[in-house]
Amino acid sequence: MDLIKITRALADDLHALRRPAGVSHVYNPLRYMWPAHERFLSRHYIMTGRLLDGDGNDDGEEYQGVATRRYLILGMNPGPHGMVQTGLPFGDVVNAAAMLGYRTGDQVPAPDLAGVELHPGRPVIGLAATRREASGERLWGGLAAIFGGLDQTLAQCFAANYCPLAYFADDAQGTNVTPEDFGKKTINGKPNPRHDPGYAAELDKVCLPYLVRVARAMRVEVILAVGRYAEAKANIIAALCPEATQQCPSPKVVYLTHPSPLATRSAGEWATMARHALENAGVLPPGASEVGP
């Protein structure tokens, strides 16, 4: 499987979708921050080597393949201060720079915003942004505490959003709209102007096959579903990865509370909850660290 090729195709297929109901602006960071996302995939999930002949000698040809990962971290969609800026899932600027191998003072790729219609209240600055995304900061910090560091986390986990698009409403602040809104007839007992089940189905047709293909190719054993929407989609992905052998069963879905400050009081609390979830499911990584509040 060519991970770079199918991810680029995913970005293009998402770009071709219509605009859903109740949304004025749709952002596709896989396209305008493609160099950053491609670098992320290449640095952490692409293996290269040389082919050997039948006698074990170098035959002079190189090969490229996708790395295996035990865990898939699955989110819902990009946050305004995370992937919308950096092109990386849960990609607050500090962790994104670290994952991409950039140091302070390095020149970083700027977003290619040609032809992109931006909401006045939702600018895209890119990796040069200074505002951190709390959810991404907590998620990567908490997982690093469990796995023993950011590099160790990436060596065992592939990260993706189910839907790599961000949606904003036509109001002054550009209210953040999430994919789960499209499936709700009512919100707080009132008709939902963003109810668009047809669009939700179109989104599934694009996003679901990509993630199933990645999970199979990477031989994912555990899907860490961040939030209830991601959990529902993770269960579908797992069901579409049939148990082929005892060594490669269907992935186990583990629900993680969303790391948003609205859901947890502190970064330490989220890390503790995440560790307990992995431990209770019997999927803690070997040598997992204890975490404190």
Image (spheres, grey):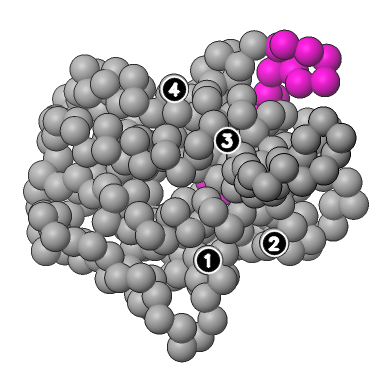
For mark 3, give the secondary structure: strand
The region drawn magenta spans 243-261
Per the model, the C-alpha gap separating discs 2 and 1 is 11 Å
Q: Which circle marks residue 151 in the picture?
A: 2
Q: Quadrant of residue 254?
A: top right
Distance between the alpha carbons at the discs numbered 4 and 2 = 28 Å
Q: Residue 8: x and y, percent?
A: 36, 42
Amino acid type, callout 1: Leu
Query: Residue 287: in sight, yes or no?
Result: yes
Q: Nearer the viewer, residue 2 or 270?
A: 2
User: How dense is the environment of label 4, judged by Cα within 10 Å: few (below 14), some, or many (20 and up)?
Assistant: some
**Residue at image mark 1:** 100
In this view, 20 is above or below 4: above
- Quarter of the figure with the C terminus: bottom right
Q: Are marks 2 and 1 in contact (CB under 8 Å)?
A: no
Q: Residue at x 74, y 18 (%)?
A: 249
Which is in the foreground here, disc 3 or disc 1? 1
Q: Is residue 247 magenta?
A: yes
Task: Tell me if mark 2 has few (under 14), some (14-19) or many (20+) residues whose alpha carbon lies within 10 angstroms of its own.
Answer: some
Mark in front: 3 vs 2: 2
Mark seen at residue 225? 3
Residue at 85% from the left image edge and 39% from the top image edge: 56
Q: Secondary structure at mark 4?
A: helix
Residue on which the image places disc 4: 209
Q: CA distance from mark 3 to mark 1?
A: 23 Å
